[in-house]
Image (cartoon, coloured by chain):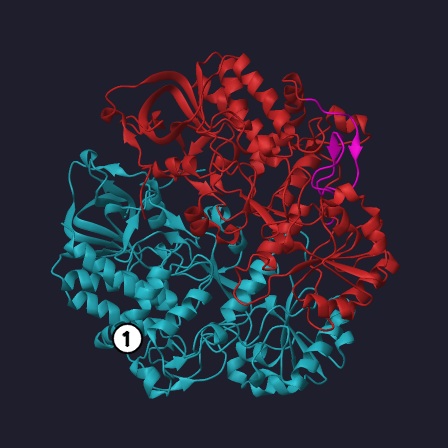
Chain colours: A cyan, B red
Amino acid sequence: MTVRNSVTPRAAGEVSHFDIETDVLIVGYGAAGASAAYEAAHAGARVLIVDRSGGPGGASAMSGGEIYLGGGTPIQQACGYDDTPEAMAAFLSAALGSGADVAKIEEYSAGSVDHFHWLVDRGVPFKPSMWDAPTWVPPTDDGLMWLGENSWPFVELAKPAPRGHRPTANDFGGKLLMECLTEAAESAGAETLFDTYVTTLVVGDDNTVVGAVARQYGRELTIRARRGVILTTGGFVDNDAMLEAYAPELLGHTKVSAGTDDGSGIRMAQALGAAVRHMSAGQVGISLIPGLAARGMVVNALGHRFINEDTYPGRIGQSALYRNNMGGSWAGDDTAVWVIVDEEGFEEVPEPQRWGVRPTHVAETAAELEELTGLPAGSLTATLTRYNEFATAGADLDHHKAPRWLRPLTAPFAAIDVKAGVRPPSEAGDRRGTGASVFTLGGLHTDLDGHVLDHDGGPIPGLFAAGRAANGLHGFGYISGTSLGDGTFFGRRAGTAAARNA
Amino acid sequence: MTVRNSVTPRAAGEVSHFDIETDVLIVGYGAAGASAAYEAAHAGARVLIVDRSGGPGGASAMSGGEIYLGGGTPIQQACGYDDTPEAMAAFLSAALGSGADVAKIEEYSAGSVDHFHWLVDRGVPFKPSMWDAPTWVPPTDDGLMWLGENSWPFVELAKPAPRGHRPTANDFGGKLLMECLTEAAESAGAETLFDTYVTTLVVGDDNTVVGAVARQYGRELTIRARRGVILTTGGFVDNDAMLEAYAPELLGHTKVSAGTDDGSGIRMAQALGAAVRHMSAGQVGISLIPGLAARGMVVNALGHRFINEDTYPGRIGQSALYRNNMGGSWAGDDTAVWVIVDEEGFEEVPEPQRWGVRPTHVAETAAELEELTGLPAGSLTATLTRYNEFATAGADLDHHKAPRWLRPLTAPFAAIDVKAGVRPPSEAGDRRGTGASVFTLGGLHTDLDGHVLDHDGGPIPGLFAAGRAANGLHGFGYISGTSLGDGTFFGRRAGTAAARNA
């Protein structure tokens, strides 16, 4: 293995001179970094944000901009939905999977209305209107959407309320969100340094983090941070060696990132003895149109349905990739995933919302569709018969899709190859990829104030993390908006804590 | 979180006095530790093995004793099977899953015949006779068995040969194996210290590992290791906090260990900046009788078959737990797993090999069995019809079970609840558990000589690991005998490397 940038911490005694001095050094200028910077500067600290790119934004600016908020926000109230922090925490504890950080979820849910107002005060606009159908990104500027709260099993585990809050933008809202947050951070006094790649932490004799070493245009730059370093460097989806070691299922798929999620912050902290959590977990943006899936069936390579098609589409993606071998990591089994729809279902989804997806095969019978798709003979026929029985009875006894989306499918039938991918309206060019776009959920173990924890469970002095460099709220599961959500929420906490650090 | 034993490394300068001095300190006295000790002592080093228990053995002594060996061993040859290191490596690379360490697999396969002879020279007996049927542990003292090499998809990926080598013993052979290895280690000169729990590594100024701190009867003991420390402390299945952070799917199941697999060695090394791999992976000993499963169908809570029932049973277990929600970590879905057999299949497996398993429900029709088991109406009926069509045609088009095990099932039908567990002959008492017995596969990242690697990919000076404290050969997958196999093989390498360490 070629070592290009050593992450082994450097002793402060070996640093003869610090080129730059600040109070709080923030590494990475996405949503978490900007939120941390605002609070640290607001609390009176001198703040320097360093990013390896030529400007702020990172993966946050490329995202849909959804933020998971609830517990009774003004947007929820205006749209007629009651919500409580308890219902929000109950949903997230189930949806974010085994090993989710319940203490963080409770804190996040209890503080969610406050956090909404903080975002609004920073200029983030939310429109009090509801988009009420399964989708990845609504084609409107509606400010509220469901993210699986009203689907089984969550509908039985917590009182459902929509909590996907969207900055007012057509399509992807991450750019607008980042504009507001960078304006906030820099207005509060945070300084910035771009094209500068932090490679190594600097530690004092007692293992306290006191700064960092960066590369800038080929030369080394040393930065002293009197009160602490906050790592907001993102996840590791762009580092194939890390994917191989921790999450090989995610190898080879389209990477949801700005190309800079190389796990450098995670590795720098691990090299210092930081603990990590759930490094195998990933969000899987499956290439299907949620509105088509909800109106039809999603089947695996054996022609079996494996999930309620009206749930949060990332949950369909996780099940497809980790449980139904869509990525091929389980030796042998075929990797196909199909959406099966009829003409009525297809036509119900307006053309612009289909993102260029067309049926891969069309046939008058399920048996004919089996031949065209290579599904085992008889498999789709049996699944369709069973589905139509459920639809006629109004009860999906296998997967509990809501009656709203149950309707017997009638010939002709279309099969859409999910692995062929989609082309969202914002992207030019042909369909491409593996049918899955992924990012990592695992990361540094932090406490409620963003302190990075060591293997004894205690804080590493002077070291903080937020955003996807940390594991945050998540167990194995994921819900849209929890990355921008926990990144901004706990990023703020980390900024405040670092500013107060003696 | 209460910190009881700090794993934060201690600086050598803080250790005023070493109570014990040795060349090579080995922490943990299972198969890996004993093998490392033999080679280190054989190479002329003074060796001390420390174990927290009152004697040697660990999980190795409680195991079945199978060792995965091949490439043309005398036992394979005597039983009439040709094999090559290349075929062995091809099988392991596929069976040990995405992210398996191919370089280690190739080294292990190339050295396997030599390693066989080394074991025989240490007194481990292998009988040149074959047990040719699916099982966890043969009821005979046959020395060779299949471990999935002859099942799909592996039969198509590599020339099949049986490679499960069993020390000559009725039932579980781990005890005998450990007797041979401890005799070898101690005859070679290794010293031992029991009831002593190593908690912390001691490091020199340049981060070189120079010793360890242990607790012995409530007092602290400091040990200097002039040439290095080898961690053979086992996995972390007994540490629920680590399971929650890394592998929550494994929580709550029966733990396959001697009760001491608390991950202490992994954590001590991580605290020093060691890298880990595949911490989410686990072996799943599913509570089904492989001979019954092979003669029938294994179905999930939807009544779907999900695997070829004649494959290595641990692969059935992994698929049940990680892909079919047997452990309940995927919110909502039912967790049932059933073995469906008919009378002929049941009777074909001799009573002693059934380990006390009896049908949970018996019925004249699949529909009746659905009612009794709670499987969705129509599901088992459809699966049985399809299976019997495949059996009649002699080709399992869905899951590729070998024709040898395909026979149409006839009424009456029995359902066996896998979650009810089994009682192996060696265990007294009632059936118990969750239907799964698990241990962890993730661990320290090591090179071919057992050096523990840091996050730059370079060796941590003076630190070695082997056995399940290391990730070894494994990706996500597992095959019986690869733990005792890579533990003894790379344990030997680590012992030699440590002895030669300046």
Chain of residue at mark 1: A
Asked if residue A7 is positioned above or below residue B173 in the image, the reply reads below
Q: Which sits in the foreground, B248 or B341?
A: B341
Residue at 53% over, 28% down: B30
Residue that extends furthest to the front in the rendered view of this protein: B429
Residue A372, position in %: x, y?
74, 71
Q: Residue A74 versus residue A318: which sits nearer the camera?
A: A74
Q: Position of residue A250 (x, y in %)?
A: 51, 55
What residue do we see at 20% from left, 64% from top? Answer: A38
Identify the residue at image location x=49%, y=72%.
Answer: A312
- In the figure, A112 relative to A407: above or below? above
Magenta highlight on residue A173: no
Q: Is residue B127 magenta?
A: yes
For residue A145, say whether it is visible.
Answer: yes
Is A439 placed left or right of B257 in the picture? Answer: left
Query: In which quadrant will I find the N terminus of chain A?
Result: top left
Left or right of B69 in this view: A196: left
Q: Residue at x 52, y 54 (%)?
A: B249
Q: Disc 1 residue type?
A: Val
Q: Which residue is mark 1?
A: A113
Give the answer, above or below, for where B395 lies relative to A313. Answer: above
Report the span colored magenta. B125-152
Whether residue A56 is visible here, answered yes or no, is: no
Q: Main secondary structure of the magenta part?
A: loop
Residue B41: x %, y % from top left? 49, 15
The local secondary structure at tag 1 comes to helix
Is A422 left or right of B455, judged from the image as shown?
right
Q: Residues within 10 Å of mark 1 (few under 14, many from 20)?
A: some
Asked which quadrant contains residue B167, the reply is top right
Residue B459 is drawn in which quadrant? top left
- The image position of residue A419, as x and y in percent, is 60, 66
